[in-house]
Image: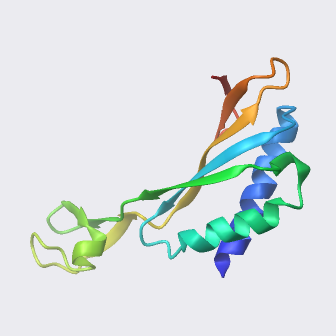
Amino acid sequence: MHELGLINYVVDEVSKIAEEQNVKKIHSVTLQFGEVSGIVTSYLHDYWKWYTKKFPLFEGAELFTEEIPAVTWCDDCKITYSTVEYGKTCPHCGSGNTWLLRGNEMMIKDVVVEDVTEGSEGKLDAQGEYTPQ
């Protein structure tokens, strides 16, 4: 059920950025999350629809998700491999001296907004930088 907490966090962060940039309308938000993050995509979408109804800024806004493949690093042979396929044991050398390099993270990739000054669309990236489209 941590998906609801994630949606709450995303709405708070996007709202802050939108306020800083004087954005009045969010069209969509794209989230990236790791393959082994434990996030259930269908829950994210359900919570998004339910939670964003409370905020006029997000009225009708869509949520898009992208999965980041999980990759593990082997300290012994210095090679990466697919975490989901092979788990903790390195398929190259058989070592268990491994660690997750990526695949457990969650980040806001971008936000498509209405450009208040021009009435057209643009994107806000994770740093809050605006790019007209």
Left/right placement of residue 62 relative to residue 38 reads right
Q: Total number of numbered labels?
A: 0
- The spot of residue 102 in percent (x, y) is 40, 61
Question: For residue 103, which quarter of the picture?
Answer: bottom left
Question: For residue 42, which quarter of the picture?
Answer: bottom right
- The spot of residue 55 in percent (x, y) is 89, 55
Residue furthest left as drawn = 93
- The spot of residue 26 in percent (x, y) is 77, 42
Left/right placement of residue 62 relative to residue 94 reads right
Left/right placement of residue 115 relative to residue 73 reads right
When the figure is inspected, residue 102 is found, relative to residue 109, above or below; the finding is below
When the figure is inspected, residue 113 is found, relative to residue 85, above or below; the finding is above
Q: How is the image coloured?
A: rainbow
Residue furthest front as drawn = 60
Quadrant where the C terminus sits is top right
Left/right placement of residue 7 relative to residue 82 reads right
- Residue sitting at x 66%, y 82%: 1
- The spot of residue 18 in percent (x, y) is 82, 40
- Residue sitting at x 68%, y 28%: 122
- Residue sitting at x 64%, y 65%: 45
